[in-house]
Amino acid sequence: MIIRDGDTHQGSKVLSDGGLVTRAITESEIEHISASESESFAWTSTFATGTTDIEVLTIKNDHPSKDLIVEAIFLGADAIGVWTIGLVSSGTPAGTTVTPLCLNREVIKTAQATAFGNASVTGSVVVDNLFTVYSLASHNQILPTSGALLVAKDVTFGAQFSTSANASITVLGYFADSSEL
């Protein structure tokens, strides 16, 4: 026997004992958003910091209706130091523009965000310390925020490294209506 959906007319097989044959595909939210809406991105900033306590990346959410949801942060440096990750003060970040990479390489969209990095970011400081990560020399780390870090519209998120070093950061995130998650 087959049961059919009234709208799509797709069918599912019913076993002789009454069980329904189904199939499920499990994917993370970032995978789903990337495939369905092409609004998943990677921001990368890699450069040599000239002094201590240098912001290496800032990302401002410019999306008119969605939150920027950070899935993971990849950190690296060639010196021992401390990463401070948090929200940025009311200053105006400047520096070299960081262009994010759309994770859906078939339908490439532009992120509705303003990001600076790759050189000394000026005009702001990290104020609300959300995460502190201690870094060993030449040791990469992953901070799996798993979607718990939400950056609202017009809010700027930033990362700062405490030591003069070659520093690298990649932020994976996607835009979504957080009330629907």
Image: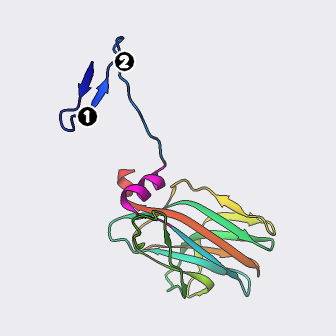
The image position of residue 133, as x and y in percent, is 70, 64
Name the residue type under label 2: Gly
* Residue position marked by numbered label 2 in the rendering: 19
- How many numbered marks are there? 2
Residue plotted at (55% across, 53% down): 146
Local secondary structure at mark 1: loop
Q: Residues within 10 Å of mark 2 (few under 14, many from 20)?
A: few
Residue 100 versus residue 112: which sits nearer the camera? 100
**Pointer 1: residues within 10 angstroms few (<14), some, or many (20+)?**
few
Q: Which residue is mark 1?
A: 10
The percent position of residue 23, horizontal first and vertical second, equals 41, 32
Q: CA distance from mark 2 to mark 1?
A: 17 Å
Q: Is residue 86 above or below residue 95?
A: above
- Which image quadrant for residue 46? bottom right
Q: Which residues are magenta?
A: 28-41
Magenta span has 114?
Answer: no
What residue type is disc 1 on?
Gln
- Using the rendered view, name the quadrant where residue 25 is placed: top left
Occupied quadrant, residue 145: bottom right
Q: Are marks 2 and 1 in contact (CB under 8 Å)?
A: no
Magenta part, dominant SS: helix
